[in-house]
Amino acid sequence: MIDADVVKRIRAGLPVDAIRQVQTTLDSIDVQPILDLIGMSMRTYQRRVKEAKPLTPVESDRLYRLVKVEERATEVFQDREIAADWLCSDNRALGDTPLNLLDTEIGVDMVERALTRIEHGVFA
């Protein structure tokens, strides 16, 4: 899918099922941290699933950020489970878990820079 199509889909709102798909892909991450990241309560999530309502553009964008960072972490660690564990583990260099930083653009930048340093052996 080309970037312009991704932008259109995010602006239109990803299907609510995308949350479960991401959670299934990450396997070791429960759905609640994903909901926290995108700014959605469990009650809202359950209602949206029942009514098959899409995510808002902001929720969709945050979920997409998680997917992109998870793909990058999997590339760096060469293992999806290790990548998911890293995303959920406290990181002193970042001052939080990488997952908790993905709700802002600066947080995404920090996590991506950390992954680049790990990839180049600067710190583990």
Image (tube, rainbow, N blue to C red):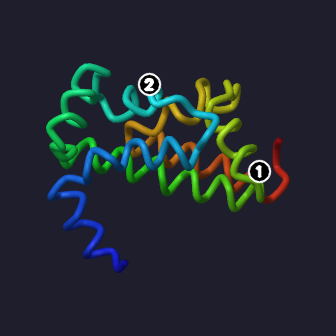
* Amino acid type shown at disc 2: Gln
Q: Kindly indicate whether the residue at mark 1 contacts the one at mark 2 (C-beta within 8 angstroms).
A: no
- Quadrant (top left/top right/bottom left/bottom right) for the N terminus: bottom left
* Amino acid type shown at disc 1: Ile
Image coords of residue 13 (percent x, y): 19, 53
Q: How many labels, in total?
A: 2
Q: Which residue is mark 1?
A: 118
Image coords of residue 83 (percent x, y): 69, 46
Asked if residue 107 is positioned above or below residue 42 in the image, the reply reads: below
Categorize mark 1 by other alpha carbons within 10 Å: few (<14), some (14-19), many (20+): some
- Quadrant (top left/top right/bottom left/bottom right) for the C terminus: top right
x 82%, y 49%: residue: 122
Image coords of residue 56 (percent x, y): 18, 44
Q: For numbered disc 1, what is the local secondary structure?
A: helix
Disc number for residue 8: none
Q: Residue furthest bottom?
A: 2
x 75%, y 44%: residue: 82
Image coords of residue 107 (percent x, y): 47, 39
Q: Quadrant of residue 90?
A: top right
Report the side of 101 relative to 45 (left or right): right
Q: What is the distance, in whole Å, between disc 2 and disc 1 at their CAs? A: 27 Å
Q: Quadrant of residue 91?
A: top right
Disc number for residue 32: 2
x 19%, y 28%: residue: 47
